[in-house]
């Protein structure tokens, strides 16, 4: 018969010490028990480690952390501009500069000294005219506005309808309604469907003599 020997083993994991005491020769049941004890120890160590690390990723608002989400992000979002400080952001304000003249009647909507027709962001909502669905902030979407850029000239007479800096003949979306000319039934926004408009792209050149009657990229 083999002698019975007492064994004491220590296992250090994650700062914890596990002591296992058993006799040899080791029986099958003992081996299973040792395996279970080892697994439990490792699980307890992992739980303790996670508990100690739980506060390291907190968005507590530490100004030095660089990842704080606690601050006011309004100045990071241009759409929250509020030129007249009335509590209504420019994008929703019907009188952006607070001069008592509504945007639809104001020839300098944002009061920056640059007339609407020459201002690349007429209503100062942080969205340039060419990408703004209501360029002059008058509450009428470009697709239905007969003076998209609010410069006092109706679309039918305006050679830069949406005020994006591109003349109609060079603009792939003349009326700034976010529908490309090639798919727009009234590309120059003058209220006349292209098929009944003698100057469909509003460039001042009649379709009959215009080399690109449908605007940039088109052909007669």
Image (tube, helix red, strand yellow):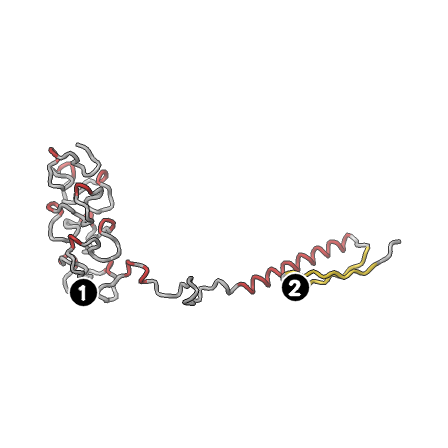
**Residue 107 is drawn in which quadrant?**
bottom left
Q: How many residues crowd mark 1 within 10 Å: few (<14), some (14–19), many (20+)? A: some
In the image, what residue occupies the spot 11% across and 53% down?
Answer: 152
Q: Quadrant of the C terminus?
A: top left
In the image, what residue occupies the spot 73% across and 54% down?
Answer: 32
**Circle 2 or circle 1, nearest the eye:** 2
Q: Is residue 29 left or right of residue 74?
A: right
Q: Is residue 156 left or right of residue 75?
A: left
Q: CA distance from mark 2 to mark 1?
A: 68 Å
The image shows a total of numbered marks equal to 2
Residue under label 2, please give it: 16
Residue under label 1, please give it: 98
Q: Position of residue 215 (x, y in %)?
A: 18, 39
- Please tell me whether residue 199 is drawn above or below residue 94 in the rendered image: above
Q: Position of residue 48 (x, y in %)?
A: 59, 63
Task: Name the mark on residue 75.
Answer: none
In the image, what residue occupies the spot 81% across and 61% down?
Answer: 6
Judging from the image, what secondary structure is the residue with disc 2 in?
A: strand
**Residue 11 is drawn in which quadrant?**
bottom right
Q: How many residues crowd mark 2 within 10 Å: few (<14), some (14–19), many (20+)? A: some
């Amino acid at each position: 018969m083999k002698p019975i020997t007492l064994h004491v083993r220590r296992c250090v994991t994650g700062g914890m010490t596990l002591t296992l005491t058993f006799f040899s020769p080791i029986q099958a049941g003992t081996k299973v028990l040792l395996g279970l004890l080892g697994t439990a120890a490792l699980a307890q160590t992992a739980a303790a480690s996670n508990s100690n690390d739980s506060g390291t990723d907190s968005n507590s608002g530490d100004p030095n952390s660089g990842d704080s989400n606690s601050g006011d992000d309004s100045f990071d979002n241009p759409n929250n501009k509020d030129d007249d400080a009335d509590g209504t952001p420019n994008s929703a304000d019907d009188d952006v500069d607070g001069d008592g003249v509504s945007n639809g009647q104001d020839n300098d909507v944002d009061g920056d000294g640059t007339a609407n027709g020459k201002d690349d962001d007429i209503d100062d909502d942080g969205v340039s005219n060419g990408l703004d669905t209501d360029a002059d902030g008058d509450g009428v979407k470009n697709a239905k506005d007969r003076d998209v850029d609010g410069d006092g000239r109706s679309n039918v007479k305006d050679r830069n309808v949406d005020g994006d800096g591109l003349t109609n003949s060079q603009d792939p979306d003349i009326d700034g309604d976010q529908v490309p000319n090639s798919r727009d039934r009234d590309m120059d926004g003058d209220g006349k469907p292209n098929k009944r408009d003698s100057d469909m792209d509003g460039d001042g050149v009649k379709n009959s003599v215009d080399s690109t009657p449908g605007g940039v990229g088109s052909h007669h």
